[in-house]
Image (cartoon, grey):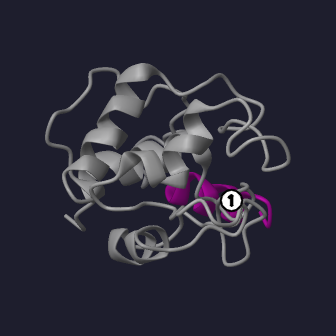
Amino acid sequence: MRLTVPLALLSVLCGCGGGGTATPPPAPTTCPIPIAKANPTFAADLLPALQSSCGSAATSCHGGAAPTGHVSYSGTPSEVHARLVNVVPASAPPGGGWFLVKPGDPAHSWILEKVTQDQPGGSGYGTRMPQGAPNLCQPTVTTLSAWISAGALDN
């Protein structure tokens, strides 16, 4: 009798969740934007792409409050935008005019350097991102560059 009540309660609780199966999180990808976008927005296009290919969970390189990857993609779009735009990177060569994202200037945006160069900034400044994964696909890189060229708006 004691075992019957907990089992009945468990079956009721599991039955209330829409079948009892959880939707698995999407798999990480290095092609989160498979078709380049000419007018991307940060919140709808760029941040989800960065989170899916670079991480935002506390256990990822770019997640949590103290990320090992020097910048966190965790938080609201405005919080992440503030940590990226017009911010001097911790790991870029000095004197290069680098910013994580320099609005209107993809050539001095460290984020683009990091995802397009095997030795970003020259030897000694890390490796191409995402580390340990295939390179970002060209449509994703093109979309990121278009957003930066258009002023890297918090939209």
Residue for badge 1: 92
Answer left or right for 27 relative to 101.
Answer: right
Vertical placement of 65 versus 131: above or below? below
The structure residue drawn at horizontal position 27% and vertical position 59%, both measured from the top left corner, is 152
Number of numbered discs on residues: 1
- Classed neighbour count for the residue bearing mark 1: other residues with Cα under 10 Å, few (<14), some (14–19), many (≥20): many
What secondary structure characterizes most of the magenta part? helix
Q: Nearer the viewer, residue 90 or 70?
A: 90
The structure residue drawn at horizontal position 66% and vertical position 39%, both measured from the top left corner, is 129
Q: Nearer the viewer, residue 139 or 44?
A: 139
Q: Amino acid at mark 1?
A: Ala
Q: Which quadrant does the C terminus fall into?
A: bottom left
Vertical placement of 12 versus 52: above or below? below
Vertical placement of 63 versus 21: above or below? below
Residue 7 falls within the magenta-colored stretch = yes
Q: Residue furthest left?
A: 39
| Secondary structure category for the residue under label 1 | loop
Horizontal and vertical percent position of residue 61: 73, 55
Q: Nearer the viewer, residue 91 or 17?
A: 91
Residue 8 falls within the magenta-colored stretch = yes
Quadrant of residue 88 within the rendered picture: bottom right
Answer left or right for 136 relative to 101.
Answer: right
The part of the chain drawn in magenta is: 1-15
The structure residue drawn at horizontal position 61% and vertical position 24%, both measured from the top left corner, is 135
Horizontal and vertical percent position of residue 130: 66, 38
